[in-house]
Amino acid sequence: MEAPTLVDILKARQNVARYLPRTPLHHYPALDEAVGATVWVKHENYQPIGAFKVRGGINLMSQLPPGERASGVITASTGNHGQSVAYAAHLFGVAATIVVPADANAVKVEAMRSHGAQVLLHGKDFDEAREHCERLAAERGLRYIHAGNEPLLVAGVATLTLEIIEERPETEVIVVPVGGGSSAAGACLVAGALSPGLRVIGVQSSAAPAAFRSWEGKRLVEDKMETFAEGLATRTAFALPQQVLWRLLRDFVLVSDEAIRRAVVLYLEKAKTLAEPAGAAPLAAALQLRHQLAGKTIALVLSGGNITPEQLRRVLTG
């Protein structure tokens, strides 16, 4: 399995642009003051599914061979990846089955169903859902779409970094949330090809650090998965994104769930925007790295806005 090239990413941009407009890159002086840097926010929460992953879903689904389209697809997800597959499958007339953990984000589950996907609840976490999904794929002859080990997904989500560099070529740092790692891998590939001086920083919750530990040790590991930020909640790391991160990622930090909660509130207060916990993690990291980032021009990838009312109440009430 090989990582996508810049040519693959440019092709993905053509595919994605047929169905999705560019998302805004907004500047908020109040966040400048909080972080001590010039802060631009890439609003992937403005996507039609409220998250960046739709870029990858569209790129992959648009290139499925006819036989795989006819047989249908299946995937496992904690939410946003599943929404991406459901949305893209509906767009291209492909039957989709999504396996999610039993306690999955209700807002995301409802969205998957609204796009016509069959949603199956199974297991206590993403990895149990994934294992069940893989069994069903083999039993039913469905095209299994792995949440991270898909070059076309990585190429698709990499297009958001292309947009950042094209709009703000002076950007010195991009901070990206990491669950499976497709967005961080895509950012590294684009930066490496077009802007070698651009520093990409990954961020994950300290309550679910499998991707961080894998990057740190240059080998795939399992770890605890106790974060409330389901977009960051993977118990095992994904091979393809990690291979890219091992080569190209400049830095990777862990932030606490409490810091992520504060960042959700800060986005509401200072940017008047709604971020899901994973989407707020880059802001939490920027605050944690304030002294390193002082005076720089940075971009924060606000990867999604799919927070449930109950999650928001808990964040706001502490």
Image (cartoon, rainbow, N blue to C red):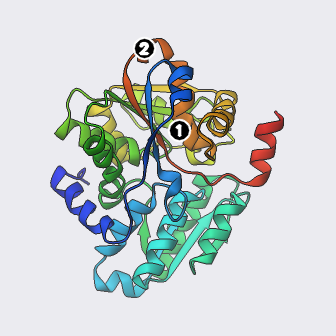
**Where's the N terminus, which quadrant?**
bottom left
Q: Residue at x 54, y 67 (%)?
A: 133
Which residue bears the numbered disc 1?
A: 222
Instruction: Please tell me which residue lies in front, 124 or 299.
Output: 299
User: Which of the numbered marks, if any, corresponds to residue 292?
Assistant: 2
Q: Quadrant of residue 110?
A: bottom right
Q: Nearer the viewer, mark 2 or mark 1?
A: 2
Does residue 214 appear left or right of residue 273 in this picture?
A: left
Q: Is residue 151 above or below residue 222?
A: below
Residue 253's x, y, as percent? 48, 25
Does residue 222 appear left or right of residue 108 in this picture?
A: left
- Packing grade of label 2 (10 A; few <14, some 14-19, many >=20) is few
Q: Residue at x 42, y 14 (%)?
A: 292
- The total number of labels drawn is 2
Q: Is residue 168 above or below residue 290?
A: below
Can residue 243 be seen by looking at this rendering?
Answer: no
Residue 168's x, y, as percent? 30, 38
User: Which of the numbered marks, if any, corresponds to residue 290?
Assistant: none
